[in-house]
């Protein structure tokens, strides 16, 4: 059975809600094992055991959140040239942009020789003030549905051999 590895980091809850929604969608595919791991707990062995990946992270200061970057720093060289061509997608929780974090994941994935199978899904919450940015988030149902759909599509593609 193939495995979809979802790795996420969340600071205010938005990215975690999106990761869980994507995992819920992926788990609707009975012929696929879906693993959901926080970035600090995920390592090179987890990546090597995965057949496809979904990376879910917040954007902070127009950049990929630190613990997600730490995950990539820790696994990069141990998996380099061992996961070439495997499919991936990215999901970004952002205030008003998200493009910077999406670009960073794309560059890292290019270095890992992964294959993007979907455009990055960026969910913006519009937070602008320090208080709003640091506050716990509740992701609206339509955005959770988009994350669930991404998880489902990735899972079906991997399980059926399309990706």
Image: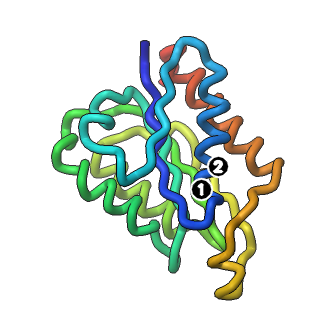
**Secondary structure beneath label 2:** helix
Q: Which residue is mark 2?
A: 18
The numbered mark at residue 72 is none
State the residue at coordinates (61%, 66%).
12
Q: Which residue is mark 1?
A: 15
How packed mark 2 is, by other alpha carbons closer than 10 Å (few <14, some 14-19, many 20 or more), is many
Q: Residue at x 51, y 79 (%)?
A: 61
| Residue 52 picture quarter | top left
Which quadrant of the rendered structure holds the N terminus?
Answer: top left
Report the colour scheme: rainbow
| Residue 18: image location, x then y, percent | 64, 49
Q: In 3D space, how far apart are the residues under numbered discs 1 and 2 (Cα atoms)?
A: 5 Å
Q: Are marks 1 and 2 in contact (CB under 8 Å)?
A: yes
Is residue 34 found left or right of 70 in the rendered image? right
Residue 56: % across, % down: 52, 51
Relative to 6, does residue 76 appear above or below in the rendering?
A: below
> Residue 108, position in %: x, y?
34, 55
**Residue drawn at x 66%, y 21% as measured from the top left:** 28
Q: Is residue 129 above or below residue 91?
A: below
Compared to 145, does 73 lie above or below?
below
Q: Position of residue 161 (x, y in %)?
A: 48, 16
Residue drawn at the location 73% of the way across and 44% of the way down: 146
Residue 73 relative to residue 29: left or right: left
């Amino acid at each position: 059975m193939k495995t979809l590895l979802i790795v996420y980091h969340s600071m205010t809850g938005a990215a975690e809600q999106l990761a869980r929604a994507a995992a819920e969608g992926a788990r609707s595919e009975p012929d696929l094992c879906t693993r959901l791991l926080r970035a600090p707990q995920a390592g090179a062995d987890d990546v090597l055991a995965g057949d496809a990946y979904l990376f879910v992270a917040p954007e902070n200061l127009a950049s990929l959140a630190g613990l997600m970057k730490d995950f990539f720093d820790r696994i990069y060289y141990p998996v380099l040239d061992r996961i070439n061509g495997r499919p991936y997608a990215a999901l970004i929780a952002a205030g008003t942009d998200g493009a910077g974090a999406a670009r960073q994941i794309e560059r890292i994935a290019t270095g890992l020789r992964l294959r993007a199978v979907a455009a990055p899904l960026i969910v913006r919450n519009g937070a602008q003030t320090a208080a709003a940015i640091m506050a716990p988030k509740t992701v609206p149902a339509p955005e959770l549905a988009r994350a669930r759909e991404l998880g489902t599509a990735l899972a079906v593609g991997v399980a059926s051999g399309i990706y």
